[in-house]
Image: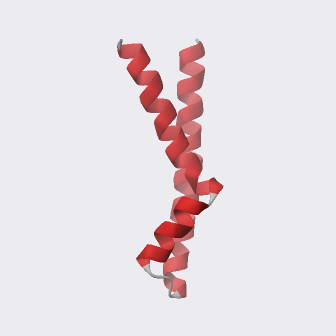
Amino acid sequence: MKKLFINLLGIIFTSIGLTFIILYLNLLSLNYSFLEYLLFILTHFSSNIFFIGILIIIIINKKIIN
């Protein structure tokens, strides 16, 4: 039950982070370069939640398999 809850938490974090990454795509229309966009994504916590969620999912799935 605990692994299921943590896995769902990872999925929720991934969904929220991906939503912010997609919303921040509007910066490209404001004459930001792709490199500036990537730096913006990597420096803001709201989009880093995506990477945290992916890490949670990978770690929990490795524990389930083993």
Whether residue 59 sits left or right of residue 5 in the image: it is: left
Percent across and percent down for residue 5 are 60, 22
Q: Residue pushed farthest bottom?
A: 31
Vertical placement of residue 47 versus 30, above or below = above
Percent across and percent down for residue 38 are 47, 67
Q: Residue pushed farthest right?
A: 45
Q: Residue pushed farthest left?
A: 65
Vertical placement of residue 50 versus 36, above or below = above
Percent across and percent down for residue 7 are 53, 26
Count of picture labels: 0
Identify which residue is drawn at 62% across, 60% down.
44
Q: How is colour applied across the structure in the image?
A: secondary structure
Q: Quadrant of residue 26?
A: bottom right
Percent across and percent down for residue 34 are 42, 76
Residues 35 and 49: in front is 35
Identify which residue is drawn at 58% across, 39% down.
12
Whether residue 61 sits left or right of residue 50 in the image: it is: left
Identify which residue is drawn at 48% across, 36% down.
55
Q: Quadrant of the C terminus?
A: top left
Identify which residue is drawn at 54% across, 63% down.
41
Q: Quadrant of the N terminus?
A: top right
Vertical placement of residue 34 versus 63, above or below = below
Vertical placement of residue 30 versus 34, above or below = below
